[in-house]
Amino acid sequence: MATFLYNLGRLAFRRRHFVALIWVALLTLAGVGAASAPAAGTTSFSIPGTEAQKAFDLLEQRFPGASADGATGRIVFKAPDGQKMTDADNKATVAKTVKELGGGTEVVSVTDPFTTNAVSKDGSVAYTSVKYEVPGMELADSTRESLEAAGDDARAAGLTVDVGGDALEAGAEPGAAGEIVGIAIAAVVLVITLGSIVAAGLPLLTAIIGVGIGVSTITVLAKALDLGDTTSTLALMIGLAVGIDYALFIVSRYRNELAEGRDREEAAGRATGTAGSAVVFAGLTVVIALAGLAVVNVPMLTKMGLAAAGTVVIAVLIALTMIPAMLGYAGRKIRPAGEKRKSSKDRKSSKEQTSSKGHTSSGAATSQKQAKPNMGTRWASFVIRRPVAVLVLGVVGLGAIALPATQLELGLPDDGSQPTSTTQRRAYDTLSEGFGPGFNGPLMIVVDAKDSDDPTAAFGDVADGIKGLKDVVTVTPPAPNKAGDTATITVIPNSKPSSTQTEDLVHAIRDKGSDFKADTDAEVLVTGTTAMNIDFSQKLNDALVPYLALVVGLAFLLLIVVFRSILVPLKAALGFLLSVLAALGAVVAVFQWGWFSGLIGVEETGPIMSMMPIFMVGVVFGLAMDYEVFLVTRMREAFVHGETPSQAVVTGFRHSARVVVAAAIIMMAVFGGFISSGESMIKMIGFGLAIAVFFDAFVVRMAIVPAVLALLGKKAWWLPKWLDRALPNVDVEGEGLRVHDDPAKGSGSGSDEDRELVRV
């Protein structure tokens, strides 16, 4: 592995024009394709194997043309104080609005609140429902704009009007300002870490190119593969973070190789062969974690995971090829590690000295500087002296933060979780005020009486049976289809959609379904948005353990190959579980309990998004292994080259701690940029990933890992002989590159710039 990547790095360095041209051409091709790609089609949400999905599919069969998956919108009217919606003037205003809506494109039906009993008991609130032909994500912008503007005349007449429903659903947009701040922080960290603006610019440039190719490709394929905007957001989030980190790893190693006195082509080859090997295996763990989301068997999650995994693959390929090429273009603008900025007079003197004597004196001077302890060395030495105290403090601290995760409540965000400044949230609150909280989450009961002797009687029995259940406010009369063998019944709960009481009601109706089946031969199915959310949460809970087993198991095997050890991969997996549990605890404390919620703009607390646990496991595991691979491979490299286990830990920290810390800060900045999003789902994902990276990088990898390795000593690198013989030798440590240690090959006479001009 190391030898192949070494040769690839040198080839890319020499053929930099060709490599750069290929990636620019790919970016251009993807960009042109995205600009000319057809608009994405339907992004319908389906959950195969659940009762809610089965009922939904049955509706499409038995009620053809009813647009069962079509979007719905609600216009909620509230009369001024002292008036009622039933007043003549207000009724006329609403009737005009209903008429205007009925003439719109893509509209199937519009209800009149005064004929459908959609006026509150006190007469202060009324609403009209609009049914569309296509799902919310597929609605034309003009249709959505018409819905939003439909209440303008009513507002002018003095009514309070707000609009809700999934017809307003649009792509989840990340906070642009927050992302810009995140990238700016990443740029500052890169300048501090790499010592120059040019060196810092390379990771940003290559990461942006990689994300551009990845996101543009997703846009091109969006219609054909039914990809939603959330897919692009995740790919952007992950691709930008890992793209910067992988490039940072290689550029940092390149500067270290320069500090050893090697010429620039040789340094680029060695950086790609050593740090590049770590990048390959770190990228593989991320790809495994993201692609493994397919085991959940939710199409939306599968597509999100595969699209993000593809973006990670692009980031790895760019790091291995474009970074060495860019290093060739940068030339002397990227200085060896430890070399401080000189005055113009000193630089002139140094250049003259280098032209006559080569790189040896500079390399020797830098090596002397590197021999001095840096912050990483001092921290590692401290941990090695007190491993038990550091280990206990780290484990207990993360364990305490993880405690709120024991009270985790799962659900999916609805309009009630939107900021209070949005019209969707105001419509939600007004409906709750006028009709009760359950009105925002009606349950749809589908009664399949095809096998019943008396379908009409069966429909009535089901409706009467549901009326007697706890937490039921309203049960509408059955609405049969033309064939008379299937009917729908709407049930209004007494509690809000995301409450445990509503979930209990769904289970109660389903439990009673067996009685209905025995008595009437009719099958009763519960669907609707609320039931779909409940089934989705349950499906994700059921898939979590198999997903963990698959992803952690595959990554564990991969890390055994990388580290040639049993205990080191085991420690890596256990450390990850600790950090992800702590991150989940923090998410529960902020988004469910409301602790410090005002600091990040969380206006409404409630259940945690259903996909958050499994999503965090997938993404955070892959990212955590990035730091593990890059940090511990440097320790393994030192151990293989003859250092004691304790010395190897210190050496690994001396070379890698600064870069790992910088990479973690960059990832936190990128993920933190999404916290400014107005979309609660994106805000929660951004916060969860940012805090998880903090716990994993600064507590697990920087404290718990060296403490455990110090306690294990040589046992950390133990591997059964039979397994050692059976495993392939991937040579992540670059042992095979020692054949290139001949000084004549590493730093020949003449200036770097002269040799580079010849190669060009």
Image (tube, rainbow, N blue to C red):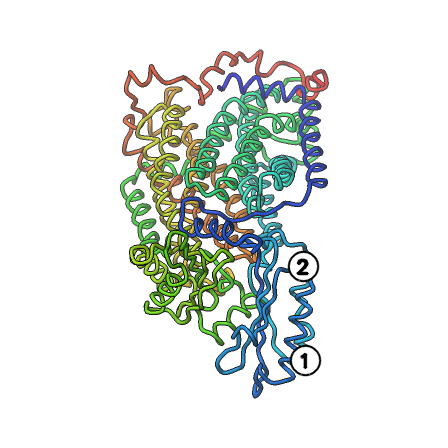
User: What numbered label is drawn on residue 157?
Assistant: 1
* Residue at the bottom extreme of this rendering: 82
Quick one: SS at disc 2? Answer: helix
Find disc 2 in the rendering and name its residue.
143
- Identify which residue, 668 or 647, lies in the foreground: 668
Q: Position of residue 692 (x, y in %)?
A: 43, 47
Q: Residue at x 71, y 24 (%)?
A: 17
Q: Nearer the viewer, residue 332 or 574?
A: 574
How far apart are the two marked residues, 1 and 2, measured between alpha carbons? 23 Å
Label disc, if present, on residue 600 of the rendered structure: none
Label 1 Cα neighbours within 10 Å, binned few <14 / some 14-19 / many ≥20: few
Graded by Cα atoms within 10 Å as few (under 14), some (14 to 19) or many (20 or more), the crowding at tag 2 reads some
Identity of the residue drawn at 43% across and 40% down = 297
Q: Position of residue 504 (x, y in %)?
A: 33, 61
Left-right relation of 392 to 652: left
Question: Does the image show residue 422?
Answer: no
Helix or strand or loop: what does disc 1 sit on? Answer: loop
As drawn, is 321 to the left or to the right of 449?
Answer: right
What's the residue type where badge 2 is placed? Answer: Thr
Q: Are marks 1 and 2 in contact (CB under 8 Å)?
A: no
Q: Earlier in the sequence, mark 1 or mark 2?
A: 2
Quadrant in which the C terminus appears: top right
Q: Residue furthest front?
A: 453
Of the residues shown, which amino acid type is indicated by label 1? Ala
